[in-house]
Image: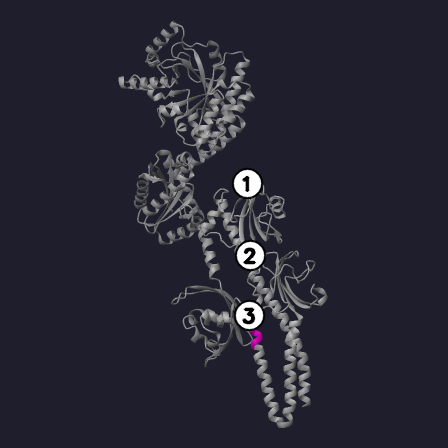
Amino acid sequence: MTGLWLWAVPSIYQEKNHIRERAYIMAAAQAQTYADQIERTIGQLDYILLSLKFQWQKNGGVLNLEEQVNAGLVPKAAKISVTVLDRTGVPVTTTNPKIKARQSVALLEYFRLHAASPSQDLAISKTVRSALTGREVLLLSRRLNGDKGAFAGVIVLAVEPATVISFVDETKLGNDDFVAVRSTDGDLFSVKTKRGVQAQSQSLSAKTVFDTPNGKMYRPASFFADGKARIVAWNAVGNYPIVTIVGLAEANIEADYEQRYRQILSIATSGSLALFLVAAAGMRQAAFRIWKAQYAREVHEAYRTATENAREGFYILRPLYGQDKDITDFLIEDCNEQGAAYRGLPKESLIGKRLSVMLPMLFESHMLAACREAMNTGFIEDEMLVPQHGTRAAQWLQRRLVRTGAGLAVTLRDITDIKRHEEALVQSANVDPLTSLRNRYWLINYLPAAVDLARDSQKVFAILFVDLDDFKNINDTLGHAVGDELLKAAASRLKAAIRPDDKVARLGGDEFTIIVESAQSRNEVATIAERIISTLQSPFVLGDGDRQYYVHASIGISMFPENGTDGQSLLKHADIAMYAAKESQKGSYRFFEASLERRLVTRINREAELKIAIERRELVLHYQPKVRSDTGEITGMEALVRWNHPELGCLPPIEFIPLAEKAGLIVRLGNEVVRMACEQVALWQEQGLAVVPVAINVSAQQINAGNISTVLANALRAAGIGAGLIEVEITESATVTEGGGAVAELAAIQEAETKLYVDDFGTGYSSLAQLKRLDMDGLKVDRAFTAQLLDGPDEAALFKAIVSMAHALRMRVVAEGVETAEQMAALQALSCDELQGYFISRPMPAADAARLLQKRFLFSDQSIREQALLDASSRGGESSIVPPA
């Protein structure tokens, strides 16, 4: 009996230490588990931000979050909202309808930090009251960059703090236990106790500094606001400045000790009484009960170590060995209700059963090998897909196996929803939202493997770069809604035109790429290109179905390995070939050739030179007069731009105007012409010359830019000349636009008393009625009509009809391209108002044009007119009243 009590007293002391040690271990294990959960949660939220930021950059700084939500690409969770802010802090688009559209957050700390720092890292703010919605939120944000890395705004995700800690099951927390999440700087994000999420924390104060990424400590009652001592453990969240803290109340630990104390005391007392009755038998029986209780307690404690929160399923497994001492099966010694729910059975039906019997389909394929490895290594964590079985859908589980003594603690967590969301995000990153085709991101990632496969299989591999001709005209004149509808229809036709094994992706705008794999020959690739061109030639019926729209496709083709041995080279060369096809004949295809790349390099260099030429003012103007057909009086000058190239000399417009239009420089070039023309007229005025209006050519792009009237007004004001001394000539294509902005620009020019002329009339799509609607002042008949004027009576009648109808609409008529005396005489007979062409005068520099202004009349004297006719006769019909400069 004395020995029994000698055992009981030290056992009580050892048991107390053992229970406290277990509490430290359990707190540390829970802190680590919660840190892992936090990292996954923040990582999933950050993945949303990265995906949306990628789409914002891909779309040129445009993103519609409402469309993203409707398409299922952004979660509709009420406690999560995403907002894109511009560089002034004003919301541009958001998933939260309560946000006020023009309310700026530019003064908030997280926005100012992004604006001041070029860092692309994720920023996590402390819990704040949202300036946009008025509720307490935790803000995750990333910087948005524009051109050359300039700050363009912020994309921010707001989440309620309770969401960050939602995975903690408060029903499993003891009285006065807590789980807290805070930043490494001490800012509290969220805290949960047995009573749920709390507004204030009983946890460590913000001043507490954790010197290590993880650890555990005991803190007395004086350390906490509620006066209760706790064991505290903490763990840093891997990639984020966040710490999870677990506090276990000492009172709960003492309660566990009290229970064990009574148990040991009861055993000692019972043993003492039993010794009086049957000393030998009683001692043996008591020892057996003590051993059994100790073993049961170890199993229970191991199970508690595994049960980190009640939303996960847990199992305690004991290995079963065969004759060769290899593990052949596992016995389910314990599990919780959630673990049993994964099997669809009550836990009483699982405990005591073999794993092979309860999981017959998964035992060999998923469980046995993993459990054996965990017994050898001590730990395994992975994800597994449980296939569909009967009415039970396929399920993704996160699995953790930890060796505990002689067995395993297994944790299972259902991550099916997370996987589906990740798959949706991957889908959104690889699919064009407008056409549902694969996008550029997918293509860039797919090409390397496709090229490697083509290299290994030695089959024909080609890339087709498809561009829709004249799509921009439809987009600009009919609006983006019609343009988007056309793109979707074109995408459907492309999918129908390719072979089943081929793939089509939209690069952006009206550009598509088709990957042809396993073709039999170069001719088969050409056949596919011809089929695509033919498919797109049929008219598109869009909108209400009352109008048909025509677009064609220009296609560039690159072949592996002749035109490149990697995806980037093949894509670049297909693009070059497409531009060559477009330049030679729209609606055609062309295979890549090395010479095309050299031409492209030359064009790119010329574009760069032209940009510099505009900045350095290397452009000059020559002037070609137009005269009255009856008197020869100079009525105006047309300003014609030339490029004074430092190496190639004076280049005519045909050498660089098309280049400027393709390179997006035509607006800047046109504005420079306006400035130079106004300054030259002012200079002629200062020289005392009788100046006449100078006509400048304005492109459709300048009109569509919406500020040509302002540019013209500023140039006139700067030069100090009247608006009547400048005339504007526009092409016919600029008159058929349906955009209200372009019409308003033309009206603004005329309201300033600047006359409007239609240039090259007869080559475009306008009609005299269209010109009347726009109230044009005159038209310049294209030189093609002048050249054919003497070919027969039909040509003369056509020209006469144009003149008659124009006069009926009170518009002046200027004949372009007058090159012979006979043409001039015929035009005079047709009552054409004004003449312009090489026969009258070639374009000349400003100094020579000034001498013409001094003459004023170019063929008013009858002898000059007769001499012109004589010269024309002697030179075969070619002459010039004013010799070229």
- Which residue was labeled with disc 2? 42
Q: Earlier in the sequence, mark 1 or mark 3?
A: 1
Q: In this picture, is 527 found above or below 739?
A: below
Q: Secondary structure at mark 1?
A: helix
Question: Do we see residue 558 in this rendering?
Answer: no
Question: Against 633, is 538 above or below?
Answer: below
The quarter of the displayed image where residue 771 is located: top left
CA–CA distance in space, label 1 to label 2: 29 Å
The residue positioned farthest toward the bottom in the image shown: 277
In 3D space, how far apart are the residues under numbered discs 1 and 3 (Cα atoms)?
Answer: 52 Å
Callout 1 touching callout 3 (CB < 8 Å): no
Q: Earlier in the sequence, mark 1 or mark 2?
A: 2
Mark 1 lies on residue: 148
What are the residue bounds of the magenta stretch? 299-304
| Quadrant of the rendered image containing residue 164 | bottom right
Which circle, 1 or 2, is nearer the viewer? 2
Q: Which residue is mark 3?
A: 307
The kind of residue on which mark 3 rests is Thr
Q: What is the x, y in percent for residue 571?
A: 41, 44
Pointer 2 with pointer 3, Cβ within 8 A: no
- Residue at 51 percent of width and 42 percent of height: 61
Inter-mark Cα distance, 2 to 3: 23 Å
Element at label 2: helix
